[in-house]
Amino acid sequence: MLKTSKKYTRTKKLLKADLTKKSSRWKYKTRYIDIKKYFAMINELVFDNKLSPFNKVYLKQMRNGTMGQVITYDWERRGTREYELHMLPFYEDKQEFANTLAHEMVHLYQMANQGDTGNHNALFYSYRTKLNRIGLDL
Ligand SMILES: [Zn+2]
């Protein structure tokens, strides 16, 4: 369903304004505060604020050109699962950072909210339209 509430439109404008600033085309150094800010905007625009934050967030280099990943930890005795987000310390620009975070948030939603494997399956790609609508891509 197409959401066109005032709040949705305002957040979408904020996101677009931030991504089209001149400085957003420069090499981007990842900041925890930006992860928090973008998480909140994407959560509102794509996931209806239904996504709980990652349990832990780390900035680190990853192998084989990996841009970001979600690691899960199962606490069998407690029957709970934790989700850890890994992001690179640097991205080519802010857009690449935002796309990567959105990509990992789709994985989180698949696993935490939809009980899915979190693979790159049809469910995963079904979010492309919603992301494209706000200027992001998977
Ligand atoms: Zn992925």
Image: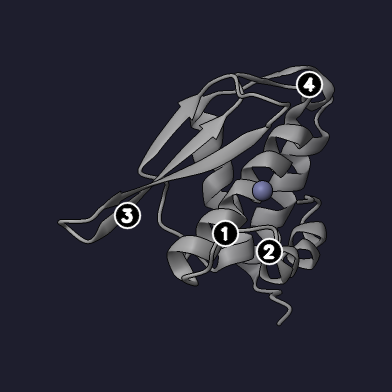
Circle 1 packing at 10 Å, graded few (<14), some (14-19), many (20+), is some
Q: Residue at image x 64%, y 55%?
A: 11
Q: CA distance from mark 1 to mark 3?
A: 14 Å
Q: Amino acid at mark 3?
A: Arg
Q: Is residue 38 above or below residue 63?
A: below
* N-term-proximal mark, 4 vs 3: 4
Q: Which residue was labeled with disc 2?
A: 124
Q: Secondary structure at mark 4?
A: helix
Q: Residue at image x 57%, y 52%?
A: 105
* N-term-proximal mark, 1 vs 3: 3
Q: CA distance from mark 4 to mark 1?
A: 33 Å
* N-term-proximal mark, 4 vs 1: 4
* Disc 4 Cβ-to-ligand 1 distance below 8 Å: no
Picture disc at residue 118? 1
Q: Secondary structure at mark 3?
A: strand
Q: Position of residue 133 (x, y in %)?
A: 80, 62
Q: Amino acid at mark 2?
A: Phe
Q: Secondary structure at mark 1?
A: loop
Q: Amino acid at mark 1?
A: Gly
Q: Position of residue 29 (x, y in %)?
A: 64, 17
* N-term-proximal mark, 2 vs 4: 4
